[in-house]
Each structure stands twice: as structure tokens, then as C-alpha cells.
Amino acid sequence: MSRSVESLLVAYHREGDASARELALVELMPLVRALAARYAGRGEPLEDLVQVGSVGLIKAVDRFDVDRGVEFSSYAVPTIVGEIRRHFRDKAWAMHVPRRLKELSLRLSRTLDELTAELGRSPTIAELAHATGVEEEDVIDALDSSNAYSTRSLHAPFDDEGDDSLADRLGSEEAGYADVEDGALVAAGLDALDDRERRIVELRFFEEMTQSQIAAEIGISQMHVSRLLRRALATMRGRIEEISDDE
């Protein structure tokens, strides 16, 4: 740490020089930015992390004991980093997660990287539990809770290749609704027929019988079946159009 900052801190704490405090904070901001940059890319804007780190810097400057003979940086760095980590733990989660699981999730993130490098593969749940000194169920809960760290807007672009949003890809028209509506209209049309006409329509379109087979089934001529079928369909069409006009 430069002598100028050390002297500013001495002037502030021993002489109550407020201007020395302000100058020290300005001189130390590069340290805050360097520490905040280590945590960039984790879902939080860098400038937000710098603001949080600045709070840690203020605490470090105000609480530092110049008479202990300790290097200021050795005291300030843990204080600033602790403030940034607390921000991730308490503020940056998109959904409410118990603090115990937040803290364990952060520990597991570091442990996972360390064990992966050491083992040359992804560690098992049992290995993570042993390394962190917790139960396997706690490891599973903490890993699951990490999914709540951030959310994605439904209006965000699905990819870099098109204009579709995530909602456009997730949503789809439910064909079943149209089937239900069509079925209701057909049922209303059938209700407008007499028993013989309804029977002919059902045999022709539901059981897929030919007109000659229907004629043999009912006991009338094929020509009569054809005439009754045309009349039945016209009646059904008229009834359906009435319903559609009413709506």
C-alpha cells in the first residue's frame, strides 16, 4: 500500500481529518474494482458489484486500527470481498432460498471446482458431502437451490439466430380446444335431426359405412339413403350456422 494512503488513514483516525478519509476512499477505488472484477460474469452487473465493494471499503477504512501495525490491504481485502459475497448470498437470488442453502451452495461451487481438478472428473454427491462435511441430502438440496439463483425473462431472445422469444418457443396452440368446439357443434347439429336421419349420419361418418351398406342396415333403397343424407347434412349445417351467428 502506498505511503500516501497510509498517511491519509493516520490523519483520519488520529486527527479526525474527514477530507483525508475521502481522499483515501478515492485512492483505494482501484482495489475495489479489481476485487469486484473477480466476481463479474456471475449474473450481476460489474458496476453493481463495485458499489457493493465500495460499502466494504468504507467499512474497512472506518474500522481500521492504524495503531496495530497491520497492513491495510490485509484488512481491507477480506472486508470488501465479504461484502460482495454477502450480496450474492442475500440479494442476487431470483427466488427465496434459505440462507443455510445459499451458503452451502456457494461452498459447493468452490468445492466442485476443486474436486473436479483433483479427480479429473465430476465428483459424486457422496464425495461432495464428505468434502463439505454435510449430509448427502443437504448437498442435493443445495445443488437444486442453485437453480433459483437467476431467472430468464420469457421475452428474452431464444437464441442469436432469430427474433423468437423464449415464450414463443414454450407456448403452443392447444389442438384439443378446437376438437372440443368442433365436437360441440356436431352434437348440436345431430340434435336437430330426427332419429332416422341421425342414424344415417352416424353410420356414414362415424362407422364409415357406404350408402349401400346403410341401405341394407336400415332396410331402404340406396337412393333414399342418399336423399335423407343430403337433407340431414343441410339441416345440420343450418343449425351450426345459427349457433355461429348467435355467438
Image: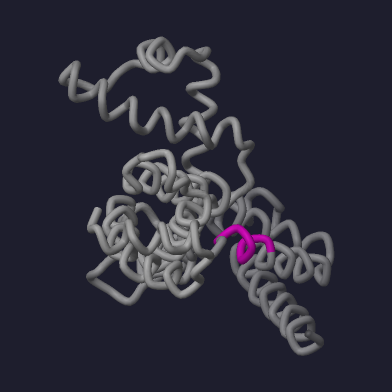
Indicate the quadrant where residue 165 lies.
bottom left
Q: Nearer the viewer, residue 120 or 238?
A: 120
Residue depicted at x 47% and y 33%: 105
Q: Compared with residue 194, is residue 141 higher up or lower down, i.e. above or below?
A: above
Q: Compared with residue 233, is residue 105 higher up or lower down, i.e. above or below?
A: above
**Is residue 147 rendered to the left or right of residue 182?**
left
Q: Compared with residue 21, is residue 207 higher up or lower down, i.e. above or below?
A: above
Labels in figure, total: 0
Q: Report x, y in % for residue 247.
A: 78, 85
Q: Report x, y in % for residue 187.
A: 76, 63
Q: Nearer the viewer, residue 199 or 136?
A: 136
Q: Nearer the viewer, residue 175 or 85?
A: 85
Region of the chain picked out in magenta, as a range = 175-180
Indicate the quadrant where residue 237 lies.
bottom right
Q: Compared with residue 232, is residue 201 higher up or lower down, i.e. above or below?
A: above
Residue depicted at x 59% and y 31%: 100
**Is residue 11 rendered to the left or right of residue 174?**
left
What's the image's color scheme? one colour
Q: Report x, y in % for residue 144.
A: 50, 33
- Say if residue 209 shows up in the picture: no
Asked if the stretch drawn in magenta spans residue 118, the answer is: no
Outermost residue toward the front?
A: 15
Residue depicted at x 34% and y 31%: 110
Outermost residue toward the bottom?
A: 245
Dominant secondary-structure state across the stretch colored magenta? helix
Q: Report x, y in % for residue 199.
A: 73, 57
Residue depicted at x 54% and y 27%: 141
